[in-house]
Amino acid sequence: MSIKSSALGFTSATATGTGSSQNIAHNLGMIPGKVFVLMDSIDSKVYTLGTHTAKNVVLTVTNGATFKIWALPPDPEDGR
């Protein structure tokens, strides 16, 4: 999966859900402050966010559903 990551955040290439927990590497080097899941279709597709790490966004997406991830670094004013 190709990705684009910078100090401003991370955007994944289009990925496909498996119905099981997936790890999407974000290369931020820290736990994201905010994570957005951009579904390609809203036809009763479901996602659940897991506990993110300094390396991966963790989520479960309906099998066959396509999506992208947008992860932002923590806001320095949040005290993280």
Image: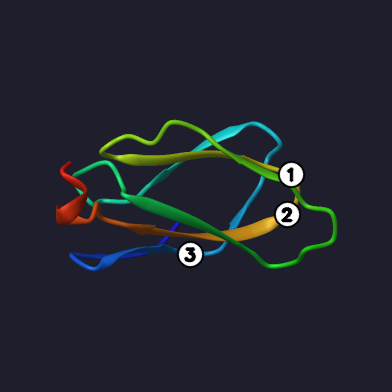
Choose top left, top right, bottom left or bottom right for residue 52.
Answer: top left
Which residue is at a point 56% across and 63% down the rendered structure image? Answer: 14
- Specify few, some or many for label 3: CA neighbours under 10 Å numbering under 14, 14-19, or 20 or more: some
Quote the CA–CA distance across marks 2 and 1.
Answer: 6 Å
Amino acid type, residue under disc 3 in the picture: Ala
Which residue is under mark 3?
13
Which residue is at a point 15% across and 54% down the rendered structure image? Answer: 76
- In-image side of 1 versus 63 (left or right): left
| Dots 2, 3 in contact, CB < 8 A | no
The residue lying toward the viewer, choosing from 16 and 33, is: 33
Rendered location of residue 33, percent (x, y): 31, 49
| Dots 2, 1 in contact, CB < 8 A | yes
| Sooner in the amino-acid sequence: mark 2 or mark 3 | 3
Determine the secondary structure under disc 2.
loop
Rendered location of residue 73, percent (x, y): 25, 55
Which residue is under mark 1?
62
Determine the secondary structure under disc 3.
loop
Which residue is under mark 2?
65
- Specify few, some or many for label 1: CA neighbours under 10 Å numbering under 14, 14-19, or 20 or more: some
